[in-house]
Amino acid sequence: MIRRDMSDATDHCWRSDHELWREVQKAREAADRKHGENSIEQIGASDSRWLSILIEEVGEVAHEQTYDAAGTVEALRAELIDVLSVASAWVSAIDAERRRAEKDTEPQEQVKTYWEGLERPAVRGTAVVADCDFPRYWAREEKLIGERIEVVRLNPSVDGCIDNRYGYGWTKVTEAKGYHGIGHQTVWIEPGSFRERGAAAVSE
């Protein structure tokens, strides 16, 4: 049995999660741009293609274990990122379908939202991405300045939101109660560009 020193478990399991999921998100975005209307981001949750796509990516991982593969940790890691990208896209499709179904059956339902464990109102919507003074602003690096994207807004008096293109922002302020277990990306928006979608969530 392989034994591992667990003294660094916190560092290994938690501190890098945010960076890992940002990498997965970037991989999904790159694949979406590459495949366009054939992207898996356009596939419904019940589409039969999901399983074959996921198995294909898992097969690439298996191939990296064979004698004629590159045989490097970097190559194996890249294939595992692809597996995570497909799996997380499938989960996102399932969650999006479930949210649509819930909205259809209970359109007026209000959901409690949080930040760092405290109840705070939050609203889902879209907004136009603005530039900011940060030298390595992620939205600038991903060429999103001027684009309208899905966001979550916590404070109407501040032109800053949470990126919600793949639903992570809303999951953070609801299921994760605003804690650091789920990372987030702050996005600055153009003043007056926020457009609310659906019912506003409230704190009670």
Image (tube, helix red, strand yellow):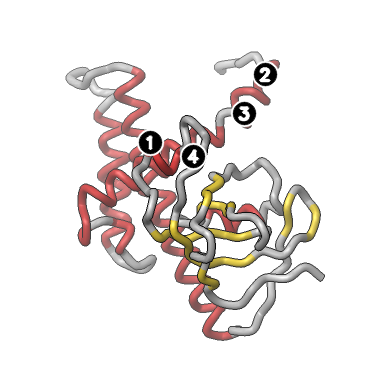
Residue 43 pos. (x, y %):
31, 64
Q: Residues within 10 Å of mark 2 (few under 14, many from 20)?
A: few
Residue 9: which disc? none
Within-10-Å neighbours for mark 4: few <14, some 14–19, many 20+: some
| Residue contact at pointers 4 and 1, CB within 8 angstroms | no
Q: Is residue 101 above or below residue 6?
A: below
Q: CA distance from mark 2 to mark 1?
A: 24 Å
The residue indicated by pointer 1 is 81
Q: Dots 2 and 4: beta carbons under 8 Å?
A: no
* Residue at the (40%, 56%) spot, across then down: 90
Q: Which residue is mark 2?
A: 6
Is residue 84 at least partly visible in the picture? no
- Circle count: 4
Q: CA distance from mark 4 to mark 1?
A: 9 Å
> Dividing the image into 4 quarters, which one contains the C terminus?
bottom right
Point 59% across, 55% down: residue:
159
- State which tag comes first along the sequence, 2 or 4: 2
* Amino acid at circle 3: Arg
Residue 4 image point, x, y percent: 61, 16
Task: Report the residue at 38% width, 45% height from top.
Answer: 85
Question: Is 10 situated above or below 51?
Answer: above
Which of discs 2 and 3 lies nearer the camera? The answer is: 3
The residue labelled by disc 3 is 15
**Residue mark closest to the camera, 2 vs 1:** 1
Residue 45, horizontal then vertical, whole percent: 38, 66
Looking at this view, is 163 or 102 the one in front?
A: 163
Q: Is residue 16 above or below residue 37?
A: above
The residue at which mark 4 appears reads as 21
Residue 122's quadrant in the figure? Answer: bottom right
Apparent side of residue 73 relative to residue 53 in the rendered image (left or right): right
Front disc: 4 or 1? 4
